[in-house]
Image (cartoon, rainbow, N blue to C red):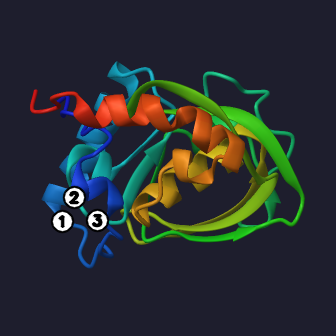
Amino acid sequence: MILDIVQYGHPVLRQKCRPVELVDDRIRQLASDMLETMVDASGVGLAAPQVGEDIRLAVIDVSHDPDCVSLLKVNGADAELESLMPLVFINPELTCSQEKETAVEGCLSIQGIRAEVRRPAAVIAKLPQLDGAVLEIETDGLLARALQHEIDHLNGVLFVDRLSAVAKVSMKNRLKRLLAEDHTG
């Protein structure tokens, strides 16, 4: 089922989400619905707060661009991107590299705004799965960026919070306009 994606200004987007304590049919259905919603919205990631749920659950699929990473290890072994996607995880832990890179980001909850964001170039993510397994993924490129972006959502952080001071100033009026719009659907 395609879910409504909440928009900038909705309070759930600023909440630090609760850990998923129990994976039951409701959580599995929510994850499935989130994947369907993400694909329908042409996104590469979607976090539970973006569909109004304040829990630490997110989905990512960057398989549309198999060359978007140059490094991909799963539990210490080299892996193929296609074998990992789509990625569904709960209660993630993230370790970021020191090296930074800048790329353009957008967000399904902040329609029509894209901006350059500086983030760590590579990450190691510990990603519990719905079946109880835990994946440790070491990666770079778009997958590293998507992991950081979605995990930020789980902590109440939006990509616009990560803009440079100059970019924040230039974006201020556009964000104010988004807040003024009626997002009640």
Q: Which residue is drawn at 22% across and 58% down?
A: 27
The x, y position of residue 98, in whole percent, is: 87, 66
Front of the two marks 3 and 2: 3
Disc 2 and disc 1 in contact, CB within 8 angstroms: yes
Q: What whole-number distance in Å separates the C-alpha atoms at marks 1 and 3?
A: 13 Å
Q: What residue type is labelled 3?
A: Ile
Q: Quadrant of residue 68?
A: top right
Residue carrying label 1: 24
- Is any atom of residue 164 visible in this view? no
> Relative to the observer, which residue lies in front, 178 or 105?
178
Q: Earlier in the sequence, mark 1 or mark 3?
A: 1
Tell me the amino acid under the disc marked 1: Asp
| Quarter of the C terminus within the rendering | top left
Classify mark 2: helix, strand or loop: helix
CA neighbours of label 2 inside 10 A, class few (<14), some (14 to 19), many (20+): some
Q: Could you say which quadrant of the image residue 174 lies in?
A: top left
Q: Find residue 107 and report its horizontal and vertical position in percent.
A: 47, 35
**Category of crowding for the residue at label 1, using alpha-carbon neighbours closer than 10 angstroms: few (below 14), some (14–19), many (at least 20):** few
Query: Closer to the camera, 166 or 11?
Result: 166
Q: Which residue does the image show at 82% across and 51% down from the upper left?
A: 121
Against 63, residue 149 (above or below) is below
Quadrant of the snapshot with the N terminus: top left
- Disc 3 and disc 2: Cα gap in Å? 10 Å
Of circles 1 and 3, which is in front? 3
On the image, the x and y values in percent for residue 183 come to: 17, 31
Q: In this view, does 83 lie to the left or right of 185?
A: right
Q: Residue 107 carries which label?
A: none
The amino acid beneath tag 2 is Ile
Task: Give the residue pinned by disc 3.
Answer: 55
Q: Mark 2 points at which residue?
A: 27
